Image (cartoon, rainbow, N blue to C red):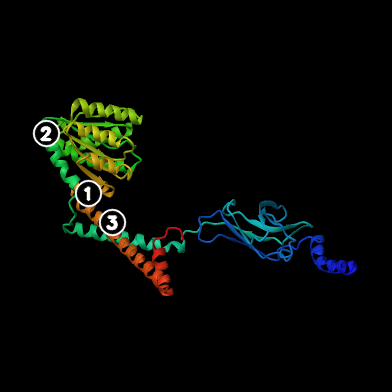
Amino acid sequence: MLRVVSTVLIVLLAPAAQAFADPPSPPPEIRAADTPHDRGRSVDLSWSPSASEESGGVTRYVVQRAVDRPEEFHAVVTLPAGSRAYTDTSVRDGVSYFYRVRAVGPAGESESASAGPVRASQQWFNPRKSNLLVIAAVLIGGISWFIFQASKGRRLYIRKIAGIEAIDEAVGRATEMGKPVLFIPGIEDMDNVQTVAGLSILGNVAQLVARYETRLEVPTRRSLVMSVARETIKEAYLKVGRPDLYNDAMVYYITDEQFAFVAAVDGIVVREKPAACFYMGAFFAESLILAETGNSVGAIQVAGTAMPTQLPFFVAACDYTLIGEELFAASAYLSNDQKMLGSLKGQDVGKAIAAGFILLGVALQTAASASGNGALVNAARWVSSLFRINP
């Protein structure tokens, strides 16, 4: 009986023992090619599995690479058994590379034939992102069309924004009371687009202040913002024909420290008691401190920021608030420049188109989930892919 069992075990285990006794066979085929539709510095590798993999004769694959000459290979990465592809992102564009894959098992290792030469290169156009090209073309077309219409003398309608309409009222009140106007163009530097938008509004406020001969206070947290604000106000005073009223002292630098700046501004508000306070730009934790201090002295306050976390505090403590994109639209709205308004209208068209596709996608996805219809599922996927940045 023991002899029979031993014979059966020998017959059954012989293939496995033989597999572990011989080195694993190498991958029969390896393919190397430049990664398509990329920015370069990347090579795609793929290979067929070793014949020894199914019997457990392969435990891992080692990808090797040689530069210029296929004789000097060096290991690039070690992958587990079952791997079929690898993307090498450590290469340079225009350099010839050779690759091979080594199959490693308990009984030894073996190497595949080399593949190459292959060179990585950058592609100028990625067809998988052609949807973004179409979106950009539609948006640019809409902007160009409305700018063209504006240049022909067509008046473009822009809805009234309460916060911008209140600027004249706030400056007028300060003039009647004989009190100053306080303007803070955010706490960020000139590399922040909200600061640029705030300074654009400052130019329009400065024109009103110059006409009414009201005192203007502009404390800044950044020295570069101070310099730009001075030039902006000087130009505004010159536009209305009152350059004699301009003084560099109305714009001053305090400190780069966030809460030291806030404490200094609060001191100015308490001492000077401005009749109008404008907060236009990027704000962070100091937004509520500034707005509550201005509110405590009874000032009309108009705020504008694109920081979502600070908008609730401005809405609660200020009389008017420009929310998000209203801050960036304010300069076009105040200047009434038809070309700037045309650009604004063109962007609105793009947003309307995007909103329409979003609603269409939601409707298709809902209908597809409810009915399980394959055509609706495919249509919903197509709509969702239109605005996908990464394919």
Instruction: Please state which amino acid type lies under the numbered disc 1.
Output: Ala
Instruction: Please state which amino acid type lies under the numbered disc 3.
Output: Gln
Q: Quadrant of the N terminus?
A: bottom right
Which of the labelled discs sits on residue 347, or is there none?
A: 3
Who comes first in sequence, dot 1 or dot 2?
2
Q: Residue at x 20, y 28 (%)?
A: 247
User: Which residue of the protein is positioned furthest toward the left in this rendering?
Assistant: 176
* Residue placed under numbered mark 1 in the picture: 332
* Residue placed under numbered mark 2 in the picture: 175
Res 48 quadrant in image = bottom right
* Vertical arrangement, residue 297 with respect to residue 103, above or below: above
Q: Is residue 241 visible?
A: no
Who comes first in sequence, dot 3 or dot 1?
1
Q: Residue at x 22, y 53 (%)?
A: 341
Mark nearest the camera among 2 and 3 is 2
Q: Residue at x 17, y 36 (%)?
A: 237
Observer-nearest of 211 and 296 = 296
x and y percent of residue 269 in the render?
A: 22, 29
